[in-house]
Amino acid sequence: MNYEELLVRAKEKLPEVSSKSERFELPKVRGHVEGIKTIIVNFFQICDLIGRKPERVLKYLQRTLATPGHFEGKRLVFGRKLSSAMINGKVTKYVEEYVLCAKCSKPDTSLVVVNGVLHKKCMACGHKSAVKAKV
Ligand SMILES: [Zn+2]
């Protein structure tokens, strides 16, 4: 099989692009369990993508997972075994609460404090909405 045939094959395997392609797709965390620890290798990439500081997202994860975590280089290390489904669930919650615009669902928001209340402000449509939870 030559290169071009391979390309055609690869294209055929791509899923159909649906009408919701505009929707923000959050990447899944990638990691593994090492002894009694859980190592996440793409945490910084995810934080970079959603435009939030890794320290901030980690704080949220530590609290909601009730598990201490720290950075080792670019890896995030949790102090116990966690399933990736559990971590993905929390990251998704964080993104829904702190990142995605409540109006247009785009991830291009920044956090601002208005009258002592934390808001996320959308760069795409200008919408501002209060964030329910504490940071
Ligand atoms: Zn918006």
Image: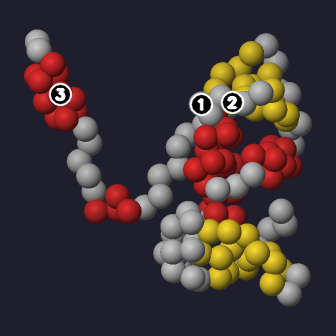
Check disc 2 and give the amino acid type. Ile
The residue labelled by disc 1 is 30
Residue 14 at x, y = what percent? Answer: 25, 38
Judge the density around disc 2: few (<14), some (14-19), many (≥20) Cα neighbours within 10 Å. many
Tell me the number on the disc at residue 39: none
| Picture layout, residue 99 above or below residue 82 | below
The residue lying at 80 percent from left, 26 percent from top is 72
The structure residue drawn at horizontal position 80% and vertical position 68%, both measured from the top left corner, is 133
- Distance from disc 3 to disc 1, alpha carbons, whole Å, reads 27 Å
| Viewer-closest of 101 and 66 | 101
Q: Amino acid at mark 1?
A: Arg
Residue 2 shown left or right of residue 111 in the figure: left
Say which quadrant the N terminus sits in: top left
Q: In the picture, which quadrant includes the C terminus?
A: bottom right
Q: Are marks 2 and 3 in contact (CB under 8 Å)?
A: no
Q: Which residue is mark 2?
A: 40
Determine whether the beta carbon of the residue marked 3 sits less than 8 angstroms from the nearest atom of ligand 1.
no
From the viewer's perspective, is residue 17 above or below residue 40?
A: below
Q: Nearer the viewer, mark 3 or mark 1?
A: 3
The reply, left or right, for residue 21 in relation to residue 59 is left
The amino acid type of the residue labelled 3 equals Leu
Res 9 → quadrant = top left
Q: Are marks 2 and 1 in contact (CB under 8 Å)?
A: yes
- Image coordinates of residue 8 in percent, x first then y, are 13, 30
Q: Which mark is residue 7?
A: 3
Real-space Cα separation, disc 2 to disc 3, in angstroms: 32 Å
Q: Position of residue 124 (x, y in %)?
A: 51, 74
